Amino acid sequence: MLALLHTILLHRSTGKFHYKKEGTYSIGTVGTLDIDCDFIDFTFVRVSSEELDRVIRKAVSEFKDALSNSGSDGMGQISLEFYQKKKSRWPFSDECIPWEVWSIKVNVVNLANEQERQICREKVGEKLGEKVINVVEVINRHEYLPKMPTQSEVDNVFDTSLKDVQPYLYKITYQITDSLGTSVSTTMRRLIKDTLAL
Amino acid sequence: MDSDLSPQDKKDLDKFIKFFALKTVQVIVQARLGEKICTRSSSSPTGSDWFNLAIKDIPEVTHEAKKALAGQLPGIGRSMCVEISLKTSEGDSMELETWCLEMNEKCDKDIKVSYTVYNRLSVLLKSLLAITRVTPAYKLSRKQGHDYVILYRIYFGEVQLSGLGEGFQTVRVGVVGTPVGTVTLSCAYRTNLAFMSNRQFERSAPIMGIIVDHFVDPPCSSQRPTHMGQPCNYRAPDEEDGGTFAGVQDSQEVCTTSFSTSPPSQVGHSPRSFSLSLSLTFDFFSSFHTCFSFHFLFFLFVCFPSCCLFIVRLSLRVDEGRRSVSPSDPVESLSAFTRKVGAFVNKPSTQITAASLDLPFAAFAPRGLDSEENDPMVINMLTDIFCVQASLHSQGSEGSGQQDDFVMVDFRPAFSKDDLLPMDLGTFYREFQNPPQLASLSLHISSQSMADDLDSLPEKLRVYEKNIDEFDAFVDMLQ
């Protein structure tokens, strides 16, 4: 989960913008970090930002707990959505317009013994590699990216809350489907909550 | 197509492609070093990180990339390739993957060079960072070590994929359209990892290496560029450093696992001085027959090689009074020991010449001997041993009676102190050298005792049978 989300965010993060008086801006530097997965034979690259890593880990941890609580053989989907804010006039709140959504569907599998775990470990590693290649392929189509904003509008396009890097505005949502096939309306609740928070 | 570009855009585009090619090589090679890469993000632009990415530059890799490019840029029909191969300790090699930076004729004339192309090249570099950890060669490179190493080769021109074997796979990292063509970055990797032995590689340039030995000097260490990367401020003056690398010859080089701060010159010198001091020592002792001193010193030099250099230097300081004598000069060092003989021998009239000594290179020792110096408290074990040997071999005019004399040498091993300890190293060694043989190990005694035991066995058995009740009671008590 972390591997895929971080791979996407690596491509959708820039350095911090520093605007100058003459209307130009300079961009900070993004560092990278190799991370070895604990239970899978895979290494991924993430942005060298502990703040960003904490946010992603927290979201993935919540998703993992929700999956565990849903019972065995559950299914779930976690989504990473990049959006832009559009200013609205009072009394309406700003509108969030998604421009790219990545959804990762997850099936929970129970493994009977260590041998199965080893086989699964390698297979999942290979699959993850394929997915990273898919992510890279999509991103390099260069289909749409928001225009670079002026200083007054930078918060409508980028998440400027982090100290060292500046990803595009994003949100992470998840949806759990238990073994009975009924969907829990976590996503709707979360979306409503986010909208009210704005 | 070039006429549609402004001169500034053309210049910028060429610069972007050039540094993109250099950074591509750096990312690929660094991903095959066998270690995890970590760079820091910086909120303030430093002006030296191309494409807003913190990618360190290994100077040797940059040099090799520039040498391969030879002032040209990747273009249509001119591809830059980085070949990654594996080489075992037995000398067998196998190509693992080939990364290709190519350009085709498809142009995007409406694209903005200074912004869009630059940002897309940045995204492409990020994609390269991700993909280099996905191909099979990455896991192999993480496990490289004594059995095999990973090598790289950079070449310019036509792409060569024949060495990847049958069924190789290709993955496209990404494309970036520019007004002069579309830049494509891809990787072809081997899928059949069955090793082919005794392969003969026919190459125009030797394979360059990654990692292997920390003590191998990089061939370009004396020609390191003063600038690590180029500033990405578009208005900065353009600095061409192609002249720095003129005259560099092709060679097989290796890069270290670790970008240690240890300068190669220091690392390179230490082993040489160490080996010189060892060779001096062993030449010195080759003529010795005193077993205990030889064994002790041999043990010392084997277990504490650093002491070797230190002991030699100490001796030279004491004897010569010069602090600049290098231990790497065996003849000069030997002359120091030769001169020291006189100081310890208690025969003022004895003229011990270099020629009378059974020493290697003795004939080369200078004739004039300096006056004796008072020994400081610094221990000089080598000199002591030398004096013993010299006295045993002296053939002076004093006659045969001199040969029966021996000099009591106060055995003071190096690095031990005459302090308050009840037993220092020297005392311990003197007391416990030449211990008597264990009685049980003596064949005569052991056989005699065994015979006695056998004879007394029946008597002992009778006694035990008589007192068997007592033994049974004892066993019951224990239970």
Image (tube, rainbow, N blue to C red):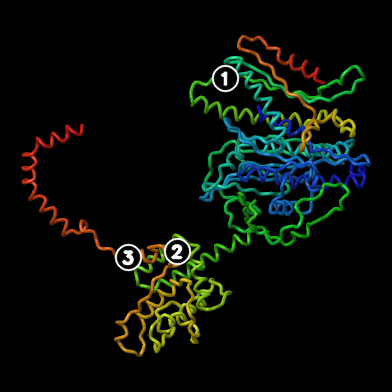
Q: Chain of mark 1?
A: A
Q: Residue at x 35, y 72 (%)?
A: B289
How far, Cα to Cα, is label 1 from label 3?
Answer: 72 Å
Location of residue B461 in the rendering, given as x and y in whole percent from the top left corner = 8, 43
Around disc 1, counting alpha carbons within 10 Å, would you say few (fewer than 14), some (14 to 19), or many (20 or more)? few
Circle 1: element type: loop
Please name the residue that numbered disc 1 is placed on.
Answer: A109
Let me know if marks 1 and 2 both belong to one chain.
no
- Between label 1 and label 3, give the one nearer the viewer: 3
- Between label 2 and label 3, give the one nearer the viewer: 3
* Residue B205 occupies quadrant: bottom right
Q: Chain of mark 3?
A: B
Location of residue B331 in the rendering, given as x and y in whole percent from the top left corner = 50, 77
The one of B63 and B451 positioned closer to us in this rendering? B451
Please name the residue that numbered disc 3 is placed on.
Answer: B431
Q: Is residue B270 left or right of residue A137?
A: left
> Image quadrant for the N terminus of chain A?
top right
* Residue B409 occupies quadrant: bottom left
Task: Name the amino acid, label 1.
Answer: Val
Task: Tell me, yes or no, if residue B87 can be seen here.
Answer: yes
